[in-house]
Image (tube, grey):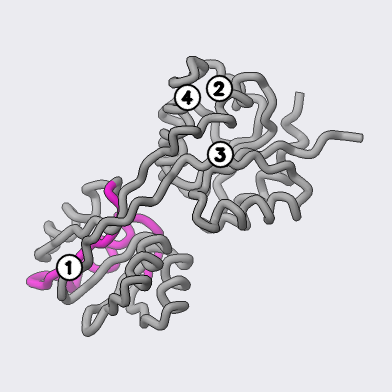
Amino acid sequence: MSQAVRAAVFRPDDGRLDNAVELLESLGATPVPDPMLEIVPTEERPPVADFVVLTSSTGVAILADTGWEPGDAKLCCIGPSTAESARGVGWSVDRVPEEYNSAGMVAALRDEVAGKHVVVARSDHGSATMLDGLREAGAEVTETVLYRLRRPEDSGESAAMAAAGDLEAVLFTSSRTVTGFLEAAAERGVRAEAVAGLDHAVVGAIADGPAETAREAGIVVDIVPEEADFDLLAAEVVEAAPSYRN
């Protein structure tokens, strides 16, 4: 009998990791849960503005827990999962860009933000792309850091397994999970071996951002689903993994 696909998943241990493990098990895989992100909320909240941009369902949950409301602001969400979370807590979503990234949000808002106040509410690891693009479009832009991302001190089991050739699949869900994996591997003295070990596994990335981060580190990315959806990513990676075994 062939061994079940061992699939490393790096989601935060805030409910999303348990859901990911359950999904992978339902697909017949053996999950290797190895959180690379720890969510540390700040006390910051978006000020009153014309537009509020939310970039993740984590940000939605943090704000909802505090009782924050968009008020008269136009609420803009990157990606359908963020929008779905916002609607799930009772907020109306006014904009979801066609392209689910910072450049897509800039393109969606470029023609209507001149002279307007736009708040971008997100983690402490956001790039300058959206802020710069909106300012170039004439907006007054404020960044609100809702939460900080840290790597748990005990992370890295997956890196050791990759270095030993004991993984058939990995699922990167953000650029930060990629860098966390590499940092954990370096701390264990096996970065080069871990990257090489992934050559014999199926590497999935949920979107182009983490895929590019992985490629820049020398990791070959095999699967990027058409939609930035974890269920879709997991299904495609697990299905492909058996053909990659040595």
Position of 130 with respect to 150 (left or right) is: left
Instruction: Identify the residue under disc 4.
Output: 218
Residue shown at the point (61%, 38%) measured from the top left: 8
CA gap between label 1 and label 2 equals: 42 Å
Which badge, 3 or 1, comes first in the chain's sequence?
Answer: 3
Q: Are marks 4 and 1 in contact (CB under 8 Å)?
A: no
Across and down, in percent, residue 36 comes to 47, 40
Q: Secondary structure at mark 2?
A: helix
Residue 77, image quadrant? bottom left
Residue 198 appears in the rendering: yes
Which badge, 4 or 2, comes first in the chain's sequence?
Answer: 2
Nearer the observer, disc 4 or disc 1?
Answer: 1
What amino acid is at disc 4?
Answer: Gly
Which badge, 3 or 2, comes first in the chain's sequence?
Answer: 3
Nearer the observer, disc 3 or disc 1?
Answer: 3
Q: In this rendering, is residue 138 above or below 166?
A: below
Q: Which mark is residue 194?
A: 2
Across and down, in percent, residue 154 comes to 49, 33
